[in-house]
Image (spheres, grey):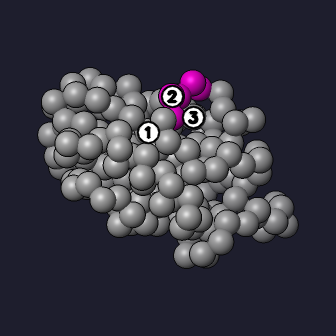
Amino acid sequence: MAHRIDEVAAVIDKDYAGRDPLLVGVLNGAVMTMADLCRAMKIHCHMDWMAVSSYGAGTRSSGVVRILKDLTTDIEDRDVLIVEDIIDTGLTLSYLVQNLRTRNPRSLEIMAMFRKPEAISAPVDVKYIGYDIPNEFVVGFGLDYAGRYRNLTDVATLAEHVYK
């Protein structure tokens, strides 16, 4: 994954050359991606965090999005790059993008480490993607099931017997 993050970081460096982007990490899952991405970037950037939820302790999105922690940074007239761990249905991210657009950023783009194209039900325009993966419940590299397995260094499919 480190190689792919380096590749994505190089493209972001080029796209944001001469600018000072604000990376908005989506807690808790994006911690690993955000840390590795900002260390791989050569340009200066700022960081802030949001926590949103639509999962609870399940393996499927509830469809109800809640902001648990909001930004501490004013994003008006800022170049904002949302950093996500995974795009599943896209419902949470779609809500988040709509919310942040009301705050008048200069630009608003998305980087996701993982995307499940087969699961997407809400359109989201993702500019930077680490990997497209199958529509399976995965854990590791920040991805969790009920708060567990985030610390795995590899990404693995969660065995059904764990959650059934």
Q: Residue at x 42, y 54 (%)?
A: 9
Residue at image mark 2: 125
SS at badge 3 = loop
SS at badge 2 = loop
Q: Residue at x 55, y 76 (%)?
A: 151
Residue type at mark 2: give it: Asp
Q: Which mark is residue 110?
A: 1
Specify the segment rendered in magenta: 122-126
Displayed quadrant of residue 164: bottom right
User: In the shown orientation, is residue 145 left or right of residue 29?
Assistant: right
Q: Residues within 10 Å of mark 1 (few under 14, many from 20)?
A: some
Q: Position of residue 127 (x, y in %)?
A: 48, 35
Q: Quadrant of the N terminus?
A: bottom right
User: In the shown orientation, is residue 155 left or right of residue 151?
Assistant: right
For the residue pair 142 and 129, the one nearer the viewer reads as 129
Q: In the rendered view, would you say 159 is above or below 22?
A: below
Q: CA distance from mark 2 to mark 1?
A: 7 Å
Residue at image mark 3: 90
Q: Position of residue 117 (x, y in %)?
A: 69, 36
Q: Residues within 10 Å of mark 2 (few under 14, many from 20)?
A: few
SS at badge 1 = strand
